[in-house]
Image (spheres, rainbow, N blue to C red):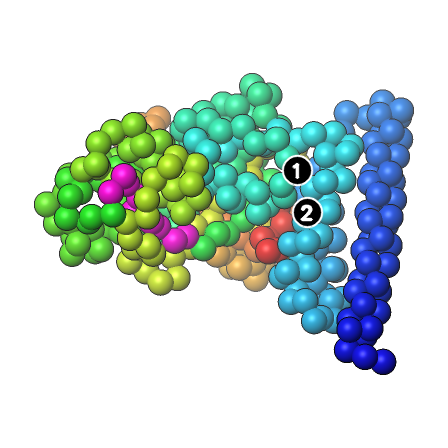
Amino acid sequence: MSEQKALQHIRQQIDDIDQQIQQLLNQRAEFAQKVAEVKIASGEQVDFYRPEREAMILRKVMERNTGPLPDAEVGRIFREIMSACLAAEKPLQVAYLGPEGSFTQAAALKHFGGSVQLQPVSTIANVFRAVETEYARYGVVPVENSSEGMVSHTLDRFISSPLKINGEVTLRIHHYLLGKTSQLNQIKTVYAHPQALAQCRQWLGDQLPHAELVALDSNSEAARRVAEMGDDVAAIAASTAADIYGLEVIASNIEDEAGNTTRFLVIGTQDVGPSGEDKTALLVSTQNKPGALQSLLKPLADSGISMSRIESRPSRKGMWEYVFFIDIDGHSQSPAVAEALAKLQNEASVFRVLGSYPKAVL
């Protein structure tokens, strides 16, 4: 067989496989629609999006993968398949910290896939408000950066909001300096979110020591504003913002830490069931007395439950009163965790489970 005929034969096989894949995808979407029909007919008030089930499916997909595609790549493909099938059941509205081109938008797409209906809002508080008022079914907000720590605005909203944590997503963050000129020495003012300014502090000090740094609610808002201004201003934002707002990339990867990563939370109203690999987030407070915090955490240690994070924030209810945000491994419905939480609640003056949710898969 000649080389040309061999190539034609291989390409025909690829075309045949593509046709089979397409038929199976449509078949999967049809079954997803049947699931929706059954739930609606039974009169259930249900969420078609099930975070725990999607996490379990993605883990199985990656576990049974034999290559040559990498596990993560196969997982991303199936994320998009599930996103499209979910949209065939019922379109999902997700609010995120905008405007378009933000890292939070990228996190929302990574978690939910490209078939959701994304709704940009101007502040973290407005993301919470969008879900609380049912303008959106879910929201995505930044909560923690690997180099700059917790996002206080997000934590503070949980103190007063009834919303729950339904998932998490991590995203590698590369910062770009964007503007209308390619000349770095022309820049007099830099706009960005406070976290971005902090994550690029050393680079800005070295390269733009005399520039004024102006904090805004989001990096994409900074890019949008710079697009309407002169040549002596710049924004720190994602590379996608350059295309969206017609800006030039002045400098790339200006973050100070090479492994700069941000964790985002998915917020909603539902309780998420166990997926097998879960976290539980708690909001607690205790009496202001010696040893109070140690007594509060003792049930977790006695039960062998791993505490992955603890952060304190002012309660805003009294001077020098604080609440603690605690992340632990495991789901609140598991017997060991449930027993430990019951003991912890007895020691706490304020106790609330913010949510149990699957650990990030992709």
- Specify few, some or many for label 1: CA neighbours under 10 Å numbering under 14, 14-19, or 20 or more: some
State the residue in front, 164 or 86. 86
Q: Is residue 33 above or below residue 274?
A: above
Which residue matches tag 1?
115
Q: Residue furthest left?
A: 210
* Residue contact between numbered discs 2 and 1, judged by CB atoms under 8 Å: yes
Q: Residue at x 63, y 50 (%)?
A: 358
N-terminal-most mark, 2 or 1:
2
State the residue in front, 277 or 39. 39
Quarter of the image for the N terminus: give it.
bottom right
Residue 337 spot, x, y in % from top left: 62, 51
**Magenta run includes residue 276:** no
Q: Which residue range is magenta in the image?
A: 173-181
Which residue matches tag 2?
80
Q: Residue at x 15, y 40 (%)?
A: 188
State the SS at label 2.
Answer: helix
Q: CA distance from mark 2 to mark 1?
A: 7 Å
- On screen, residue 224 versus residue 163, left or right, reads left
Q: Residue at x 60, y 21 (%)?
A: 134
